[in-house]
Image: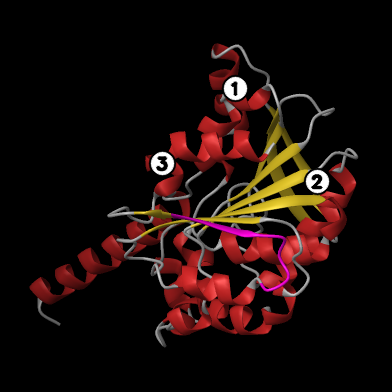
Amino acid sequence: MPRILKRSITITIIILLVWIIAAQSCMKFRISDGDAQKKFRDSGLVLKTITNKINGTHLHYAETGSDTLPTLLFVHGTPGSWEGFQNYLLNKELLKHYRIIAIDRPGFGYSDFGNAMNLEAQTTIISEWMNSIYNNRPVILIGHSLGGPLIVKLAAACPKYTKALLILAGSLDPADEKPEKWRPILFNTPLNLLVPGSLRPSNEELWYLKKDLVNMKGDYEKITCPVYIMHGTKDMLVNYSNVAYAKKMFTKADSVYITTLENENHFIVWTREKEIVELLLKIK
């Protein structure tokens, strides 16, 4: 074998190994408990970070505020972690009225990172955990993107104390999901080692999502609380058409309130924080 070819193969193998090692440690979209707690202390607040074991699965979450108050429970999309909602946990106006909790969904953050689950399995774990932390006060569920359909399933599983749903750019319509055929090739083969960080579990659960959304149609009939929906008209990741689907499906809800955000994208959790906080204070 020519020396130059041997050298090229060696360099390629080294680059591949470096990438595999780097892929395991980057893009996890999470903050250490110690760093998060320090940030909250610097703002004059106490942050609790807790990991519970539910049916053999670790569920990690962050909490601020008094446990005598109603609860805001934030559920992130894919990928992500509780950290995406940290500004809400830091919001002192919200903390006058709510205990605020944000979770790492199974497979993300510090909840058994990398072990993806479909929505049904996630609902089983999170709803049991919700029962364990229930403080006899109402719960408002807030879900962004893939967290949108998950909070619908959670409300269907825990209807007695769910006061309202706030769906932010929620991916609800199965017709809007077109699962790319390359996704299982990644998570079912050694190629998965090349996918960085939380994109690995994200890739897998997005493959499950269309079937998950079809299977959850019966959950909508169990939702009787008010439902609030905020969605941008320029959302390139979750089409605005999901709003029409939601209005069609929530037939038993007390009411469905739609906030259309003109020319807004998918990332309204961060770009429209002011409006979201105002709505949560109104719901109380």
Few, some or many C-alpha atoms within 10 Å of disc 2 (few <14, some 14-19, many ≥20)? Answer: some
The image position of residue 120, as x and y in percent, is 72, 73
Q: Residue at x 85, y 61 (%)?
A: 55
Residue range in magenta is 251-259
Q: Residue at x 74, y 57 (%)?
A: 225
Few, some or many C-alpha atoms within 10 Å of disc 3 (few <14, some 14-19, many ≥20)? Answer: few
Q: Residue at x 85, y 42 (%)?
A: 133
Residue 272's disc number: 3
Measured in 3D between alpha carbons, the distance from the residue under mark 3 to the one under mark 1, in whole angstroms, is 16 Å
Measured in 3D between alpha carbons, the distance from the residue under mark 2 to the one under mark 3, in whole angstroms, is 31 Å
255 falls in the magenta region: yes
14 falls in the magenta region: no
Answer left or right for 48 relative to 241: right
Q: Amino acid at mark 1?
A: Glu
Vertical relation: 99 (above or below) 158: above
The residue at which mark 1 appears reads as 93
- Which label's residue is closer to the chain start, 2 or 1? 2
The image position of residue 253, as x and y in percent, is 71, 65
Q: Are marks 3 and 1 in contact (CB under 8 Å)?
A: no
Q: Find numbered disc 2 in the image and state the secondary structure of the residue it sits on.
A: strand
Vertical relation: 77 (above or below) 206: above
Q: Residue at x 78, y 35 (%)?
A: 70
Few, some or many C-alpha atoms within 10 Å of disc 1 (few <14, some 14-19, many ≥20)? Answer: few
Q: Find numbered disc 1 in the image and state the secondary structure of the residue it sits on.
A: helix
